[in-house]
Image (cartoon, rainbow, N blue to C red):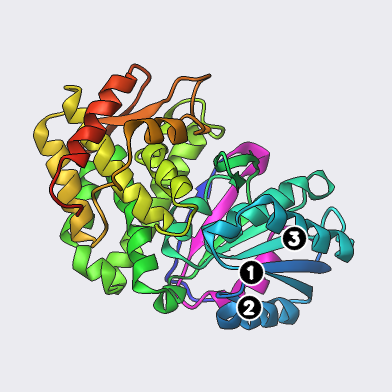
Amino acid sequence: MQSNHTCCSVELGTRSYNIHIERASLAHIGDAMNTLGIPATRCMVISNATVAPLYLATVCQSLLAAGWQVLDYILPDGEQYKNMPTWSAMMDALMDTQLARNEPIIALGGGVVGDMVGFAAACYRRGVPFIQVPTTLLAQVDSSVGGKTAISHPHGKNMIGAFYQPRLVWIDPDVLATLPTRELRAGLAEVIKYGAIWDASFFDFIDQQAKDLQSLDDVAISKAIADSCRFKADIVMQDETEKGVRALLNLGHTFGHAIESLTHYTSFLHGEAIAIGMCMAARLSVQLGYAPTITAMRMEAGIEALNLPTSPPRWSTATWLIAMGHDKKNIGSHIRYILLHDIGEAFVADDVKDSDVDRLIKSYNSEKSVK
């Protein structure tokens, strides 16, 4: 393999694993599998209808060359398929294979594939090894790391799932060359999020390199992926099951998940909804006196520089509150929000009133145009 790679570890005792980032590494996944201490017998690669024609053959050839027998299964592509019927059909296919408990499953695709396959791996035979091979920027910098696996329910996004860590995260930035521009930009929303919650200098880097990142400049995108993975790994190591600091990773997600749910996962990509949600959270932070006005201005400018939306659909406050009331991060019937003291300083707010949200929503609904 090439030596110019980045590797960081998620140290969780017996559940520890590496995040390997290297260009042109997709063709070496078979060799990587043979370093995990899993006997090279059978494995199953699960992808989707968009990614499989591009990369399934490369992955399967690498696995076969490394001594693995390879099975595969193809999911439909789209957030709207992250549901129980699709997941159940995948489980039926797993049952048909009769994979043993030590035979791994490989998730080849974006966040939907990784989340669904991870949840299947957690449940099948009460847990089999699984490997994340993320092919979208959003999955490479966020969802493939940390062991959150789930499917969605009509009442809310990712409401059914488990914390189940992968054995390896294998990232090849070269696959981003086939990613549609809109998907790339959506992934950058999760990248700039790390700066917003954790590191103001990283936020500034993303803002300043917005054009280079969107054109997949080698230096800029490599740094963005590597630093994002380190931020995520650091947070997960501190709080694997989201009892504390890991909740900060949900900046913008309370609003964003509501947007996705209310539009039935068909109008906004996940990153687009989160971009809007982060702008809403920043504005709410200013409105409540937690942050200076410049914080919301910087957030909106940073999101705009990535060509992502900044203003929400015009729904009533009641509509918002009902949708957010189903968010999995809530405590009882109380809606939790992640807010900002400043860029790089996020916190969990449990004291936001419905009347505060009403004022925020009315401020957006009174604006002349949606950005």
Inter-mark Cα distance, 3 to 2: 17 Å
Asked whether residue 256 is drawn in magenta, I would say no
Q: Is residue 295 left or right of residue 158?
A: left
Q: Dot 2 lies on which element?
A: helix
Q: Is residue 127 above or below residue 90?
A: above
Name the residue nearer the viewer: 311 or 131. 311
Asked whether residue 16 is drawn in magenta, I would say yes
What's the residue type where badge 3 is placed? Met
Q: Residue at x 48, y 55 (%)?
A: 265
Q: Quadrant of the C terminus?
A: bottom left
Q: Position of residue 317 (x, y in %)?
A: 33, 32
Q: Is residue 60 above or below residue 107?
A: below
Name the residue nearer the viewer: 154 or 123. 154
Asked whether the viewer can see residue 3, the reply is yes
Write down the residue under mark 2: 56
Q: Which residues are magenta?
A: 12-38
Comparing marks 3 and 2, which lies closer to the viewer? 3
Tag 3–tag 1 contact (CB < 8 Å): no
Q: Quadrant of the N terminus?
A: bottom right
What's the residue type where badge 2 is placed? Leu
Q: Is residue 341 left or right of residue 134?
A: left
Write down the residue under mark 3: 90
Residue 47, numbered circle: 1
Q: Residue at x 49, y 78 (%)?
A: 24
Q: Quadrant of residue 72?
A: bottom right
